[in-house]
Amino acid sequence: MNDYQHSDSFDNLFELYQEVIIDHSQHPHHFGALPQATHHAEGVNPLCGDTLTLYLKIENAVIRDAAFQGHGCAISTASASLLTDSIIGKSIDEAKRLFEAFHQLITSEKETAADNMLGKLIILAGVKNYPARVKCATLAWHTLQAALRQDAQPVTTEA
Ligand code: ZN
């Protein structure tokens, strides 16, 4: 683990986007319940104390709407906000591909062609330099997977 050997470019990238992350955490998009939800799931990240409930309205395998509620750190809240922005209007298959690309982005050193599909999710790329925060950033995505599977039990990042 090279936790303390960040390259300058990664640090700059994180700082560049830090204000956007803070803005999303203070004014999250799609925050609240979704009465017409067809799918929902709960997620917990015990390491940080982040909890969230994600709601989806799915019709004909397309995510028509999404919303979330919960308590979490700035990274987990910003990630959930960005997730809802990113998946609304996407098919379930597209959302799963987005999850894979996002997971790659924040856990791998390499840039991949899939980075192109991430859009503003790239804001969270700098999280990979802070391994303790990766689970904060992926919590919403694991919860999305659980919601698509219609899991009744809360999903945890420590599974
Ligand atoms: Zn957190």
Image: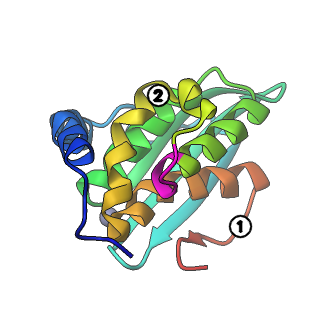
Q: Pinpoint residue 149: horizontal percent, then vertical percent.
A: 78, 55
Q: Residue at x 74, y 27 (%)?
A: 91
- At mark 1, the secondary structure is loop
Residue 2 occupies quadrant? bottom left
Which disc is residue 85 wearing?
A: 2
Examine the rendering and report whether any part of residue 54 can be seen. yes
Q: CA distance from mark 2 to mark 1?
A: 24 Å
Examine the rendering and report whether any part of residue 26 can be seen. no
Q: Pinpoint residue 112: horizontal percent, then vertical percent.
A: 58, 37
When the figure is inspected, residue 87 is found, relative to residue 124, above or below; the finding is above
Which disc is residue 152 wearing?
A: 1
Q: Residue at x 69, y 46 (%)?
A: 39
- At mark 2, the secondary structure is helix
Residue 65 painted magenta? no
Which disc is residue 11 wearing?
A: none
Kind of residue at badge 2: Asp
User: In front: 61, or 78?
Assistant: 78
Magenta stretch? 105-110
| Quadrant that contains the N terminus | bottom left
Categorize mark 1 by other alpha carbons within 10 Å: few (<14), some (14-19), many (20+): few
Going from the N terminus, do you reach mark 2 or mark 1 first?
Answer: 2
Question: Which mark's residue is nearer the viewer, 2 or 1?
Answer: 2
Categorize mark 2 by other alpha carbons within 10 Å: few (<14), some (14-19), many (20+): some
Q: Pinpoint residue 70: horizontal percent, then vertical percent.
A: 38, 56
Kind of residue at badge 1: Ala
Q: Is 61 placed left or right of 50 in the picture?
A: right
